[in-house]
Each structure stands twice: as structure tokens, then as C-alpha cells.
Image: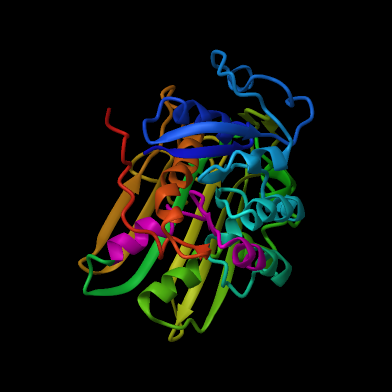
């Protein structure tokens, strides 16, 4: 029997997932929620560039709850809108409806010490009140640096170090990399994620998750941050990166054990293929890479592409579908938080048809 799903959000990810749900034999789209009043009352097909669906976008949360879906797939805004996300997700959970989400990526590992208690306790209470479950995923933080490395670690006898890298060219990206990463800004400016405590909270949740999976207790978690400044103008989807401004950043989050960095998350994000030529890049352009130094040593690269070849759209679609495809397993989970460590193999039932 197919799972009855409400999708919340018709932004970049939500639109792509809705198109998949409408043709998927394992899921039935029964409702779509939106927070933008300009979208309320419009056919979901119109909002998503599809034909008419007969499903009307709504901001009526109680009306969506009354549909009694098996789950809500929440593709809302980022953790920058934490209060709104917690309030909305909590309403569904208290009503006994499981939630899968890509919004609050620090929730990929809710027990990370960097998570503020006011982000965690309300959801724990809502899950307990409604006997419901909540699963959050992403690509990074998310399956590219939790599912992938932990699966590969299961092929090893010893792991001396594990490193998960995002190696992406942001030239076609239109999100906020100026404030968050300092790309396009003068090098003397301090970006939000450059602050170690914020970087660990926002991007480092999978470090203690991997440590938990490996059965170790980390000494501490530390970070590094580097900037590469361009000496020529570099075009991007958001305009031109002017000479003298940052055109690439590289950061690392180290999970240190016995005085050495044993679990490392690394980003190299550049604008244009010529930026930061000495920094790591994949054998496959625009990829996620796992490097395990162990017995055996393992290197894995994974690239995502949309049907049009866009790595950003491909990665975002995979992120949304990881959450969607987890719904049957989340439904079968005990009430409370669900993480990558709790889920069984999710093989994409119904994807071959």
C-alpha cells in the first residue's frame, strides 16, 4: 500500500520532489503546505511547472493534519528560521504524524553538544506527546558524510582516519554564500561559518555521529578555515567576483581522538574551475568524496546531476528523495528522533518501474 504524504514547501527542493511523488507507485500526494501567501489557493501543478493536479496549496496546518497522512515531507527553510521550523514541525508531530525533513540539518545528530537545547527539547516533547518520529537529512551535513563514510567503514578492519569532502564549484549557485562563507567579500571580513562554534553547530553534526558509530569518545572537535583571493574578475550566476575578493574557501572540521584528527569533514567551495588551483578537487568534477585510510584504504567519489546536467539541482533532488524514501522506515521506527544510524537499508522501493 502506498504511503499518503503531505509535502511542505514548494521551493527549489520541494518542487522537484513533488514531481517525483506524483508519478511514484509507493507514495500518494494528498496535500501540499506553503508559507508564502502568494502561493495559497493555487494548483500545485502550476507552482511546480507541471500540469494541473487538483491539489491546492494551503497554509492551513490543521487542514493538512486532518488529512491524516502517513508522514509530512518538510522542505522548509534552513536553520536560520529555526523557530518557525520547530513550531510547524512540532504541530505535525504532536498530532501523531511522522516528519521527514531537510531543513534543520543540525538535527542529523540531535545529541551533538553544539545543538542549542531550545532546538532539541520542543521536538522531543512533541514526539513524546504524539508518539511520532522525526528524521532529518541533507547531503552535507547528511548522507554524503554520514551514510557514505559509515557504510564504507563497515568494509574495514581498521580505520586510521576517515575524511568526507564536498568539492563543488558554486558558480551556478544562487544561495547565500556571501554572508555564510564570505565568498565574494573582502578577505578581512569574517563570515558566519568562519566562527568555529557556528561552523561546528551548522556543519559538524556527523562528526560525533561517526564517533558514536565507531564506538569512540572524541577528545574534542576543532576547525580550520582558509580563503583564496582572486586577482581577476570571475563571473558567476550571482554576478562578478571582483579582484581582491574571496573566490574560494576551504574549511575542515576535525574530530580528534588520542590527539589526532581521525574524523574530518572538509569543504572546498570555489567560484570557477580556475579558483584555488592547489586545493583538492575530485577526479569527477563537482563531487562528494570519501577517503578512508585503513585496512583496506578506500576512496569513493559520488557525483549528482539533474537531467539537465546541473550538479546543484541533482544534489538537491537526491537530498529531498533521501528524506522521502525514508518514510516507510521512519513510520516503522519508535517515537522520537530518527538518525542515519537507526535506518535500515533504503533501496528505493518502486524506483524501477
Q: Position of residue 272 (x, y in %)?
A: 54, 35
**Is residue 334 in the magenta section?**
no
Quarter holding residue 158: bottom left
* Quadrant in which the N terminus appears: top left
The residue nearer to you, when weighing 7 against 91, is 91
Q: Is residue 87 left or right of residue 162?
A: right
Query: What residue do we see at 57% from left, 43% from top?
Result: 68
The residue nearer to you, when weighing 7 against 118, is 7
Residue 238's place in the image compared with 344, above or below, is above
Query: What residue do we see at 57% from left, 29% from top?
Result: 15
Q: Position of residue 131 (x, y in %)?
A: 56, 63
The residue nearer to you, when weighing 90 against 346, is 90
Quarter holding residue 23: top left
Q: Which residues are magenta?
A: 124-153
The residue nearer to you, when weighing 83 against 105, is 83
Query: What residue do we see at 64% from left, 19% from top?
Result: 43
Residue 338's place in the image compared with 215, above or below, is above
Q: Position of residue 237 (x, y in %)?
A: 63, 28
Q: Position of residue 317 (x, y in %)?
A: 48, 36
Amino acid at each position: 500500500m502506498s504511503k499518503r504524504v503531505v509535502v511542505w514547501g514548494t521551493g527549489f527542493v520541494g518542487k522537484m520532489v513533488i514531481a517525483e511523488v506524483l508519478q511514484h507507485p509507493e507514495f500518494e500526494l494528498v496535500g501540499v503546505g506553503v508559507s508564502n501567501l502568494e502561493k495559497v489557493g493555487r494548483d500545485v501543478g502550476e507552482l511546480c511547472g507541471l500540469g494541473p493536479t487538483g491539489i491546492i496549496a494551503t497554509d492551513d496546518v490543521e487542514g493538512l493534519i486532518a488529512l491524516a497522512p502517513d508522514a509530512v515531507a518538510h522542505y522548509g527553510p534552513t536553520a536560520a528560521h529555526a523557530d518557525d521550523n520547530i513550531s510547524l514541525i512540532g504541530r505535525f508531530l504532536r498530532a501523531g504524524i511522522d516528519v521527514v525533513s531537510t531543513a534543520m540539518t543540525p538535527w542529523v545528530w540531535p545529541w551533538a553538544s553544539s545543538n542549542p537545547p531550545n532546538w532539541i527539547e520542543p521536538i522531543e516533547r512533541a514526539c513524546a506527546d504524539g508518539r511520532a518520529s522525526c528524521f532529518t537529512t541533507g547531503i552535507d551535513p547528511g548522507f554524503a558524510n554520514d551514510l557514505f563514510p559509515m557504510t564504507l567503514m563497515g568494509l574495514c578492519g581498521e580505520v586510521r582516519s576517515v575524511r568526507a569532502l564536498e568539492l563543488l564549484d558554486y558558480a551556478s549557485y544562487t544561495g547565500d554564500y556571501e554572508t555564510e562563507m564570505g565568498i565574494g567579500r573582502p578577505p578581512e571580513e569574517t563570515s558566519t561559518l568562519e566562527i568555529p562554534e557556528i561552523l561546528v553547530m551548522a556543519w559538524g553534526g556527523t562528526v560525533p555521529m561517526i564517533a558514536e558509530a565507531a564506538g569512540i569518545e572524541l577528545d574534542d572537535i576543532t576547525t580550520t578555515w582558509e580563503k583564496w583571493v582572486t586577482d581577476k574578475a570571475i563571473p558567476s550566476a550571482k554576478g562578478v567576483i571582483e579582484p581582491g575578493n574571496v573566490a574560494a574557501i576551504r574549511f575542515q572540521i576535525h574530530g580528534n581522538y588520542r590527539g589526532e584528527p581521525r574524523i574530518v569533514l572538509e569543504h572546498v567551495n570555489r567560484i570557477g574551475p580556475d579558483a584555488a588551483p592547489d586545493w583538492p578537487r575530485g577526479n569527477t568534477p563537482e563531487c562528494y568524496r570519501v577517503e578512508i585510510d585503513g585496512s583496506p584504504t578506500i576512496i569513493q567519489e559520488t557525483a549528482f546531476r539533474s537531467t539537465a546536467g546541473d550538479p546543484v539541482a541533482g544534489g538537491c533532488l537526491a537530498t529531498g528523495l533521501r528524506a522521502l524514501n525514508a518514510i516507510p522506515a521512519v513510520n516503522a521506527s519508535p517515537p522520537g528522533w530518527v538518525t542515519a544510524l537507526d535506518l535500515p537499508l533504503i533501496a528505493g522501493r518502486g524506483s524501477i518501474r
